[in-house]
């Protein structure tokens, strides 16, 4: 059961190699990495891996007559459009190479077939168990808890995650106008990411799922976990939002990018804040304090009686793999 993986990256040197080694261990046979204005030499960290194909964003003109590509060709300045064109290109490549499944993720995301443990080739066994009629698999997101100013290796060090559907909000301060906004506990995305059977004609409906050329939805199973390391310390915060410097306020669909993402993009790129001020801001308004971690692990209680589920859960499978499997070092 050959498996492929595709990602579009910009300046992901700290995460890229470890991510690809992890998915290779899980059973991914072929990996397609597209460079989106990458300037930090990320590609040099994986040039010795023969199963990784690295190249620039696909030329939109190559897909001019491809069903479903036109909507993305119309938005050349939008990262999600370029990403989607790269995925469309990869679907054709994967089909031609005889791959059975193609996973679409980012460098700060890990597929975790099971929450309790991870073993070599787990993804091959996982996909073998998927119903033959299923056209895609949706991995629901679990977002890592940003509770350290810095991580040496977040994949091995962080084990606490916000689960899908976690109820609650957090305050986010806007130091540029003095206002405070309310953000969901899951700061990244709450939609998840998909793997598909790479059949030509299927196209991404943005970064999270896929449709047929007539825009009808695929038959999808919801299985497994997507571990999303959205903010992994202050340096990751700065790198992420510098990478977002040219992102518009809306997605290709026209939907507004969430307010805290727009705020942090502008704070990092357009404000006159010094690095020291940004560090202090991250520590106060982004970092999850030990007290909040303890409270969220317990869930909400009234008079000692639980009235809501915990909004942090512990998942050690990926962390344990990075700590114990020589292939991942």
Image (tube, rainbow, N blue to C red):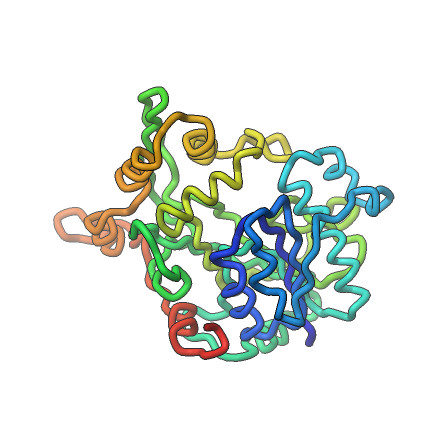
Q: Position of residue 213 (x, y in %)?
A: 79, 47
> Image check: 151 left or right of 294?
right
Q: Is 91 situated above or below 68?
A: below
Determine the residue located farthest toward the left in the rendered image: 303
Q: Position of residue 75 (x, y in %)?
A: 70, 34
Determine the residue located farthest toward the top in the rendered image: 177
Residue at image location 75% in from the left, 33% down from the top:
74
| Viewer-nearest residue: 257 or 190 | 257
Quadrant in which the N terminus is drawn: bottom right
> Image check: 188 left or right of 175?
right
Residue at image location 53% in from the left, 64% down from the top:
17
Residue at image location 52% in from the left, 63% down from the top:
19
> Image check: 34 left or right of 298?
right
| Viewer-nearest residue: 36 or 256 | 36
Residue at image location 62% in from the left, 70% down from the top:
49
Q: Position of residue 281 (x, y in %)?
A: 30, 35
Q: How many marks?
A: 0
Q: Position of residue 90 (x, y in %)?
A: 73, 57
Q: Is 254 situated above or below 44?
A: above
| Viewer-nearest residue: 12 or 121 | 12
């Amino acid at each position: 059961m050959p498996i492929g993986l595709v990602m579009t990256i910009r300046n992901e040197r700290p995460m890229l190699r470890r991510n690809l080694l992890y998915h290779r261990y899980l059973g991914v046979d072929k990996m397609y990495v597209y460079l989106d204005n990458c300037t930090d030499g990320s590609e040099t960290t994986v040039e010795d891996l023969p199963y990784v194909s690295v190249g620039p964003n696909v030329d939109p003109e190559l897909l001019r007559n491809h069903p479903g590509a036109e909507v993305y060709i119309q938005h050349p300045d939008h990262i999600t459009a370029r990403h989607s064109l790269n995925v469309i290109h990869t679907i054709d490549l994967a089909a031609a190479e005889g791959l059975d499944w193609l996973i679409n993720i980012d460098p700060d995301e890990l597929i975790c077939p099971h929450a309790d443990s991870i073993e070599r080739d787990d993804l091959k066994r996982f996909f073998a168990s998927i119903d033959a009629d299923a056209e895609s698999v949706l991995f629901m997101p679990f977002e890592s808890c940003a509770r350290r100013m810095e991580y040496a290796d977040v994949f091995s060090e962080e084990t606490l995650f916000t689960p899908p559907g976690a109820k609650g909000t957090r305050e986010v301060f806007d130091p540029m106008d003095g206002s405070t906004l309310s953000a969901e506990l899951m700061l990244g995305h709450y939609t998840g990411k998909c793997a598909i059977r790479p059949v030509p004609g299927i196209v991404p409906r943005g970064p999270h799922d896929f449709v047929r050329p007539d825009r009808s939805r695929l038959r999808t199973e919801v299985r497994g976990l997507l571990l999303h390391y959205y903010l992994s310390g202050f340096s990751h915060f700065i790198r992420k939002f510098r990478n977002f410097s040219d992102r518009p306020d809306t997605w290709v669909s026209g939907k507004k990018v969430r307010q805290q993402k727009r705020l942090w993009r502008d704070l990092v790129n357009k404000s006159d804040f010094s690095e020291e001020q940004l560090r202090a801001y991250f520590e106060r308004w982004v970092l999850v304090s030990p007290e909040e971690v303890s409270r969220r692990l317990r869930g909400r209680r009234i008079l000692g009686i639980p009235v809501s589920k915990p909004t942090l859960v512990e998942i050690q499978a990926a962390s344990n793999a990075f700590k114990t499997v020589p292939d991942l070092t």
